[in-house]
Amino acid sequence: MSEVQQLPIREEVPEALTWDLTKIFASDEAFEAAFATVQEELKEADTYKGTLTNGASAFLSAIDYLLSISRKLETLYVYSHLKNDQDTANTTYQALNARATNLAAQVGAALSWFEPEVLSLADDVIWGYFDEEAALAPYRHFIETIVANRDHVLPAEQEELLAASGEIFGSPSKTFSVLNNADLVFPTIKGENGETIQLSHGVYGQLMESTNRDVREAAFKGLYEVYKQFRNTFASTLSTNIKAHNFKASARHFESARQAALSSNHVPESVYDTLVDVVNEHLPLLHRYMELRKRLLAVDELHMYDVYTPLLGEASISYTYEEAVEKALEALAPMGEEYLAVVKSAFDNRWIDVVENKGKRSGAYSSGAYDTLPYILMNWHDTLDQLFTLVHEMGHSVHSYFTRTSQPYVYGDYPIFLAEIASTTNENLLTEYLLKTESDPKVRAYILNHYLDGFKGTIFRQTQFAEFEHFMHVEDAKGTPLTAEFLSESYGELNNKYYGPALSNDDEIKLEWSRIPHFYYNYYVFQYATGFSAASALSHKILTEGPEALTNYLAYLKSGSSDYPVEVMKKAGVDMTKADYIVDAMKVFEQRLNELEALVKELEN
């Protein structure tokens, strides 16, 4: 409690360490005026409905209206959520954010006719409009993304039936969420000092990093004892969710649920298969890392509750925010002057809300809209991890800045498939910089392990999840019952394959499938691994291949959604339909594993 009381209230935070939201709206009154404008313009939505058959001019007017109101709405929403996040106890901004969220739902409902109406037009009609009206030219790719999956759009009555069933299809995920987050009661365990600790999802993650092995083991076994009790219920919700994915894919004439899921971003299925294949080929590297972990922890048996605890204690290095700013600029210097100018503007012109205050949202993020700055929220502490978080979020913000200043609004954002690449590239550059400038063996060992642990968690672990996710869909499509026993045995075998012989078998980990919310997200997790791998390849190119590599990278940052994600990455210098970029990432992992092994020997001597 004493720490909470020491936090400053919002008004006590120095202005220089807060973001400047007056650049969005000069006052709340200005927000209210803009809000009223959107409400008024929304009344016109029905006047555009049913007009897309009236010729090219009407088609253009409808697109312009749709984009105009969406653009204004996004600005309203971003202002309201940033105001709310800076002090979540402030009831004025709670209400403001709730109203903006409600308005977003109203706009979504009022404009929901647009895509079905576009798809009701024949291709020759649509592209005839483009031939007739030159002002439509900027919207060609936007419309292409809508009509590209025309073969998978059903007749209107069937589409209406599927849409009406949406809540039913979503019920397995909702049931999982309620059970997992609200209804499960976890046991208490003894903490490091003998105190009683109530297990929860958040507390469990913290305890897995405890340096006290007894605490880790108690948390691990206590958590999974609860999941074991409900394993049949979780198998039922997950199985039904998989069946829903397979049913909808079949109904829309896709060959598989995976093809259906990846089609929204036009990502070839080969990207998924290549990731799984290359990671499987390189599992011996993860096995080596597990052997090193076992050695450093000095345990006879390495268990799953040993794979997250820090190997080398706390880093003997820390940074104030001011020092971190300097380090970030030095680390990102290889990005060139154009990039650094944006970073400096972020630091100098209050894009960043730096320090923790009472009521402030936890964590860190980059957020913004097309007509706002790409703001960054931090809760600063003087640690190396916070420096990594700062450059990570800066990567998102610079990506957003270049996209919005280079593209029209219609392409002024980017898909998740591309999002984590820019942020992780920055992290890789920081790692390289620190390894070049830090000579203390203990500090270097900590930095290397920070990288290896991040790689383990993002590439190996997320690919393991991706492999299991696809396995479940394939087995269900074949008619295999996804019982708790079948899922547990299958997951246990996969986990053993990934972590290798250094890890002792823990029956509890066979149930990990039951607590992963991402298994309800429909082929989402693979993007973490592909993004991390692409970032590794790009940062290496920037550091070793000179100006052309940097030019290509900046072109990616400026592309937004003006082309399909895989094509954007090809222009950046990474062909994600091939294996090279993942193989190259594995080479970096091996190189840093070699160095850590050598450093450990040096420190032991």
Image (cartoon, rainbow, N blue to C red):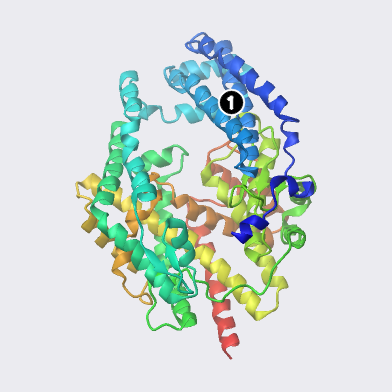
Decide which of 572, 303 is in the foreground and name it. Answer: 303
Is 524 drawn above or below residue 582 in the view shown? above
Q: Amino acid at mark 1?
A: Ser
x%, y% of residue 359?
61, 47
Which residue occupies 21% across, 53% down?
483
Give left or right: position of 296 versus 480. Answer: right
Decide which of 48, 313 is in the foreground and name it. Answer: 313
The extreme bottom residue here reads 605
x%, y% of residue 42?
57, 17
Give left or right: position of 265 versus 78. Answer: left
Give left or right: position of 507 versus 142. Answer: left
Q: Which residue is mark 1?
A: 70
x%, y% of residue 161?
31, 24
Decide which of 232, 524 is in the foreground and name it. Answer: 232
Which residue occupies 36% across, 30% down?
152
Where residue 147 sits, quadrant-wise, is top left
x%, y% of residue 200?
42, 57
Evaluate whether residue 539 shows in this view: no
Where residue 67 sits, quadrant-wise, is top right
Q: Dot 1 lies on which element?
A: helix
Q: Quarter of the image containing the C terminus?
A: bottom right
Is 75 drawn above or below residue 571 in the view shown? above
Decide which of 567, 536 is in the foreground and name it. Answer: 536
